[in-house]
Amino acid sequence: MEQDRYELGLQKLAEVDGRGGEEVIAGLRHIAPDLGTYIIEFAFGDIYCREGLTLPERELITLSSLLTAGGCEPQLEVHIHGALNVGIPPRKVIETFIQCIPYTGFPKVLNAVGVAKKVFADRDINLENSQE
Amino acid sequence: MEQDRYELGLQKLAEVDGRGGEEVIAGLRHIAPDLGTYIIEFAFGDIYCREGLTLPERELITLSSLLTAGGCEPQLEVHIHGALNVGIPPRKVIETFIQCIPYTGFPKVLNAVGVAKKVFADRDINLENSQE
Amino acid sequence: MEQDRYELGLQKLAEVDGRGGEEVIAGLRHIAPDLGTYIIEFAFGDIYCREGLTLPERELITLSSLLTAGGCEPQLEVHIHGALNVGIPPRKVIETFIQCIPYTGFPKVLNAVGVAKKVFADRDINLENSQE
Amino acid sequence: MEQDRYELGLQKLAEVDGRGGEEVIAGLRHIAPDLGTYIIEFAFGDIYCREGLTLPERELITLSSLLTAGGCEPQLEVHIHGALNVGIPPRKVIETFIQCIPYTGFPKVLNAVGVAKKVFADRDINLENSQE
Amino acid sequence: MEQDRYELGLQKLAEVDGRGGEEVIAGLRHIAPDLGTYIIEFAFGDIYCREGLTLPERELITLSSLLTAGGCEPQLEVHIHGALNVGIPPRKVIETFIQCIPYTGFPKVLNAVGVAKKVFADRDINLENSQE
Amino acid sequence: MEQDRYELGLQKLAEVDGRGGEEVIAGLRHIAPDLGTYIIEFAFGDIYCREGLTLPERELITLSSLLTAGGCEPQLEVHIHGALNVGIPPRKVIETFIQCIPYTGFPKVLNAVGVAKKVFADRDINLENSQE
């Protein structure tokens, strides 16, 4: 039932993207509320709720896709938070970006690392002192 | 030392891409041998040999990047083989492509599934009979 | 209810893409049937069934998006058929591609016209003799 | 004659993009005036003056192309104004972006809606109170 | 005058792309002749006839743009011929592709080298025996 | 030996990108120092140090690739400086961007010219008074 997809999606969105995801949806309320509904129902209710990949694996795949697409810095910011929220260590976020170099070249990787720098600062993450 | 990067890369390339990778390098021999050397030294010797991600994780990230870039069907073919070579089950390759839908839309996912269809047929993989 | 989205989507897919759409879905049956389900439920059941744009307007937008994305020749083929199926005259398909030149440059427009050439030949459309 | 293409283009640019278009051309005067001339002569004098599509149809196609290309937020801003200038209702601009979801995924659609939000605010358009 | 732009463009097209360019234009005759006219008038009559860059420099820039865009293999084929036609040595075509690696990653460079391989074979160019 | 690649790359980076390049590397120190090392060793030590193209030719190719990729404004800024540093006259930078119009369309060229405007202002370059 539709209600189920929406409820499941809302729960998954909260689990993955936390406040950042909620803000994206809230920002659409007065201009394109259906877009927010589709993100919740389809992206999170249908896709993220599937079996076959762990949530951390889904976030690695998402980070790679957003980095490669280019021009998706706002979404990269939400999903770097998301990756950390589901337990990916900060170093592994950076390592994911480095794995993309042979496939995307340096500029897109530099842009993604720039977004990570902002997110890590927001969360007081200091890679040099961190164990992971 | 350079020799080390080349040797390490060649070994990693064989481990990941198997015959498909060797054929790519061989195909460059008479026209752009240095390009083959850089793929071995840099992509496989430097990047794939790093710590911080497992080989299967590196292949999930690579599949997502190649799907998202578009127009990389020959490289997707090599790396779907690569993903299977490092132990990713066929269903998980498809699941990786499905995770990209919200970020890339359907056409690129359809193209990637089309390549997987060819690779699975080459390897006599039948998802319907398979346990994974 | 889910059944409704699927049924509505299937009907809309048949209306727009006709046999080409059915073949795409059939081709996914043994490898990624859920991908076919999402195309039917989400792309056609949710999006194409919305109010606010006519079907021909939706196809103009789709042709422009596929041309601009690049590397989507198989999907362009399906949707050039789709555009003709919903009543867009062949000349207007070409005119849509020409409108993209300032935004995408010539190569992508040339590729799209190449696909139209194939579709028009398949449907025995001869622009020179045609009134539209 | 060249003069004609330039004059026709200038008139069409004013009709479509209004002040936003003029500002783009003015901003090029001291660094790349020929680029401005080509936009006027070729994009507007040649392409936008063609028959076969209405101006609103041309703008739907343009919005779809700019959204799909990514990284074209300044041009999207000019052409959302342009779409409204030629009579496309604000809701239909949003609907055009929503039609792109299956072909581009959510991030590019979110970016385009973000630009529309700014343009609608600049023009005091409130979709919730509006009839269209 | 328009005639001049067309005549100048046709001459420049013949000089650069030779038979390959003529075939592209001829292939458009029955489906989108105006597209051919714009390529001649605007791309070759306006842009390629400008001062400020040599023809070989224009072709290096074109090869880099087509490689980076992706999915432009047919146009790459025409312009690799074009580069050779205006005097760029075969090795320098390959070197141009190698310079793109840090900015585009390996897959697009591999695709471009694959097209060069075909063009060089068509022209009986053997890099190993060649002095340049 | 590795040291050699690093030393050669550092020297070449300083020659081409000057302070802008050093700032990019410095900005990576606390978050992704290995990314900086790969840029120095691979992009500058391996690729930029090759024979077969002059440094100005390498920068023309780089500018074209970054413009075409889109979303690489920070890297375009560094490499417009780089182009000027290796002796390309300001007008030729603009001419390079204009050569891309037929292959990328106007929006990406407008974005690149916008970055050049900022770089030229930073360097007190006034194209109208300049001889080149």
Image: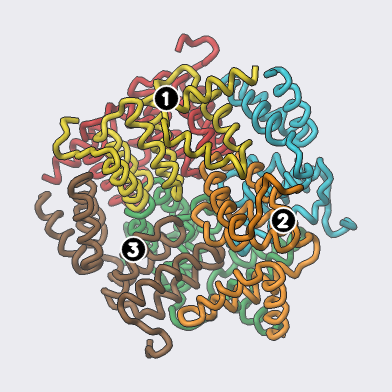
Chain colours: A yellow, B red, C cyan, D orange, E green, F brown
Q: Please, what is the three-letter code of the amino acid marked with disc 3?
A: Ser
Q: Nearer the viewer, residue E13 or F57?
A: F57
Instruction: Write down the chain letter for disc 1.
Output: A
The disc labelled 2 sits on which kind of residue? Thr
Q: CA distance from mark 3 to mark 1?
A: 61 Å
Identify the secondary structure beneath mark 1: helix
Q: Nearer the viewer, residue E62 or C101?
A: C101
Instruction: Provide residue A86's location: percent of width, then percent of height.
Output: 35, 26
- Give me the disc on residue C96: 2
Say if residue C104 shows up in the picture. no
Looking at the rendered image, the disc whose residue lies closer to the viewer, 3 or 2, is 2
Q: Determine which residue is flagged by label 3.
A: E130
Residue shown at 64%/29% (left/top)? C42
| Residue corresponding to mark 1 | A15
The chain identifier of the residue carrying mark 2 reads C
Task: Tell if the residue under mark 1 belongs to the same chain as the one under mark 2.
Answer: no
Q: What residue is drawn where x is 75% and y is 70%?
A: D49
For discs 3 and 1, the disc positioned in front in the rendered view: 1
Residue E122 in the image: state x and y as whole percent: 50, 57
Q: Is residue F113 above or below residue C6?
A: below
Above or below residue E3? Residue F5 is above
Q: Quadrant of residue C33?
A: top right
Q: Position of residue B66 (x, y in %)?
A: 44, 39
Residue drawn at x 56%, y 55% as measured from the top left: D118
F66 up-or-down from C15: above or below:
below
Q: How many marks?
A: 3
Dot 2 falls on a residue whose secondary structure is helix
Disc 3 chain ID: E
Which residue sits at x=40%, y=74%? F93
